[in-house]
Image: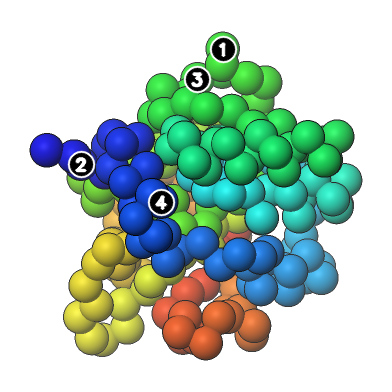
Amino acid sequence: MLTQNLPEYWENLYQTGKDAWELGKVSPILTEFFKHPSCPKKGRVLVPGAGRGFDAAAWAERGHDTVAVDFAQTAFDTLTSVASKHPKLSALKIDLFEMNPKSTEPFDIVWEYGCFSAIHPGRRDEYFEVWEKMLSPGGIVIAAFFPMIRGTSLGGPPHPTSEGELMARLDGVFDITERIVPKKSMPDRVGKEEIWLLKKA
């Protein structure tokens, strides 16, 4: 039985055209965030669960050395093609939970959008541990959490989260330095996402 923990699960979705999470372009909230005063002007970027790499390419085009990670073959094939056109972008095929400081140099920035809601909820604390060990001292996580529950139930996939869950899981692991409500969300995501800036506690 295929589970979210296996690349074959995601490859099947790509092959059957059920990759609705792929926007086919840079995420509007990332384009908006690039203009925000809190957006880092420099730093090495990790994009876990990068999919076809539109957001990763945007970071690279902005001048950041960027590593896009995915383990689904279709996603990685596209990532490799995209990376060939961007000198500052590289693609890494690996299970993100197997990442460690020996697999690549540390990062100053983690851009999270969609990966948190795609992995099995039981592995969320483990995912935070990946962020923690892959960040350099003083590094930050820029996490666009979606979908966020606000008073109503919202089923997955993707798996929803809530302010309460995030506060509890992040406590003692990451400090929340800023929360930003995007103004340019995709129409079906308006009011369901926020960008949180996180630093190691």
Measured Cα–Cα span from mark 1 to mark 4: 30 Å
Mark 3 vs 2, N-terminal side? 2
Relative to 44, does residue 187 appear above or below in the rendering? below
Mark 3 vs 4, N-terminal side? 4
Residue 103 visible in the snapshot: yes
Measured Cα–Cα span from mark 3 to mark 2: 23 Å
Instruction: Residue at 73%, 73% (x, y): give it.
Output: 32
**Residue under circle 4?**
14
Q: Quadrant of residue 152?
A: bottom left
Mark 1 is on which residue type? Lys
Instruction: Residue at 43%, 37% (x, y): give it.
Output: 72
How many marks on residues? 4
* Mark sitting on residue 166: none
Q: Quadrant of residue 130?
A: top left
Furthest toward the left, the residue is: 1
Mark 1 vs 2, N-terminal side? 2
Q: Quadrant of residue 58?
A: bottom right
Please provide percent x and percent y for residue 71: 45, 33
Disc 3 secondary structure class? loop
Relative to 3, does residue 117 appear above or below in the rendering? below
Mark 4 is on which residue type? Tyr
**Residue under circle 1?**
102
Mark 3 is on which residue type? Asn
Disc 4 secondary structure class? helix
Disc 1 secondary structure class? loop
**Residue under circle 2?**
3
* Left-right relation of 88 to 102: right
Mark 1 vs 4, N-terminal side? 4
Measured Cα–Cα span from mark 1 to mark 2: 27 Å
Measured Cα–Cα span from mark 3 to mark 1: 5 Å
Q: Nearer the viewer, mark 4 or mark 2?
A: 4
- Contact, mark 3 vs mark 1 (Cβ under 8 Å): yes
